[in-house]
Amino acid sequence: MTNHDPAHAGWFADILPDDADSATAAIAEGTTDQPRHWPEIAVESGFAADVDDYYDRLHKATLDATRTAVAEHERADDRQLVHAIRSLDDCERTANELAERAAEWAGGLFADVDAGIEGAREVATYEPNTAAERRAVSLATRVVDLADEAEAIREFIERTAPAVAPNLAAMAGPVLASRLIALAGGLEALAKKPSGTVQVLGAEDALFAHLEGHAPSPKHGIIFTHEYVRETRPADRGSAARALAGKLTIAARIDHYSGDHREGVHEDLRDRIATIRARAEDDEDGAEGDR
Amino acid sequence: MSAGSPLPVGVERRTVAGEETLATRGEPVYGEPTDGDWRAWNASRSKLGAMFEHGMETGLAGGDRVLYLGAAAGTTVSHVADFAGPTYAVEFAPRPTRDLLDVAQSRDRLFPLLKDARSPETYAHVVESDLDAIVQDVATRGQADVAVRNAQFLADDGRLVAAIKARSEDVTADPEAVFDRAVDRLGDAYEVLDRRRLEPYHEDHLAVIATPR
């Protein structure tokens, strides 16, 4: 029968009628090229006694599968992101420091050793002949492992952040979204912060220097890494940072209190940034007019 | 309200808590007013309810087999499941889906699915073919595209009953221009039978009734 080819099969193919776990997995993970008359096929194949029985089984299976899927998404919580982003930073910083050390050591033993992680990757493939070479190659191998771990953590963050904070991740990117959550101490804490605080998260040193009276107020903290701030001309960066922080704060609140994607807030921000950047063009036009 | 087309069997115009309103029979789910078995269906909270209030010919007759795209927390889909037959409810966001599960718990022909309506292959092994209707209320960009991709679930004489939200496509453009583009894209898979804006119940929303080409 055609329904034994997985590409054409219904969720119930190869599942015993009372195997709830397999049914849950099949509904959550299965795919098929096109829909068919599943109730009739299920009755023909003996999975269900009749169409009513099929729908009863489908009801139980979809409730189970969807409840499990929702719970999995909710376990992908903000605490995991906080650990992940801190681990990512530690792994990257340590890998870079150790890569320098490994390059220095290996450079005295092998010819043409490049600096950095890529140099360590090269050294890790060398065949050592002496005790010293064995240590240098081994150290380079640890550097590569750490760099690979950082990359794997980054991929985890990119998968997890959109489930934990869909609007914040869409607006800031998964990594910056996770940094903001970590700096605030969680998604709920971030959702409760005023946007002026979000604007300078990560610039605490500059902020306290300002409060003690010997520095100007910081225009932006970690959100400087966002292209909307970084790629806006310096004279308008404060405006861009304030606009971005305002919408990030709203995004964090939507994510914490409701969790659905809302396109409106993203469009509003795009409009606002376009307006701020248009000032630079206006100034240029004005300057030309003066000539 | 306008006389228009007959309502599906199972949907009635009744007086509930002193107000004339659409109503269906079923377990209350979101604190709506009730009168005996009947529970009020507020057209300002439901695009499909607003289509009925405007007297649009949706093709829904009662007992229909339905795919509902964009079920959210289940407010409208609970009323659909009350009057329709087997109803598949697709929602992408986990948090509202938690509420949808409660709605489905008390309705044994409502099948909740945490899936992305832009990827029908991820639920084509669950949702059956030759359905009577697709009811669509997704608030992502590319709403017409979603309807086109899901046309495969409809019977030849089935109906697409869609609400297109202008702001989801382009906040800055004139809504009518957005609607024209969406209806044009629908033409790739559907013949559009009727279109109408949903004011005063919903601002900048277009209702579209269509049938597969």
Image (spheres, coloured by chain):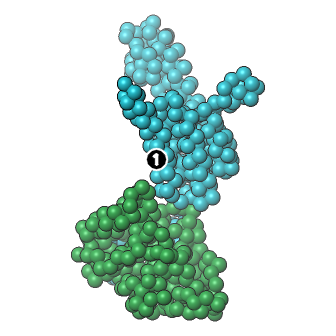
Horizontal side of A70 relative to A275 (left or right) equals right
Place residue A7 in its image quadrant: bottom left
In the image, is residue A269 above or below residue A259?
A: above
In the image, is residue A86 above or below residue A263?
A: above
Place residue A75 in its image quadrant: bottom right
User: Badge 1 is on which residue?
Assistant: A270
The chain that appears cyan in the image is A
Q: Residues within 10 Å of mark 1 (few under 14, many from 20)?
A: some
Name the foreground residue: A289 vs A89. Answer: A289
Name the foreground residue: A86 vs B144. Answer: B144
In the image, is residue A72 above or below residue B53?
A: above
**Residue located farthest toward the right when viewing the structure as drawn:** A212
**Chain letter of disc 1 in the image:** A
Q: Residue at x 42, y 19 (%)?
A: A119
The chain that appears green in the image is B
Instruction: Pinpoint residue B151: horizontal percent, then vertical percent.
Output: 31, 71
Asked whether residue A97 appears in the rendered view, the answer is yes
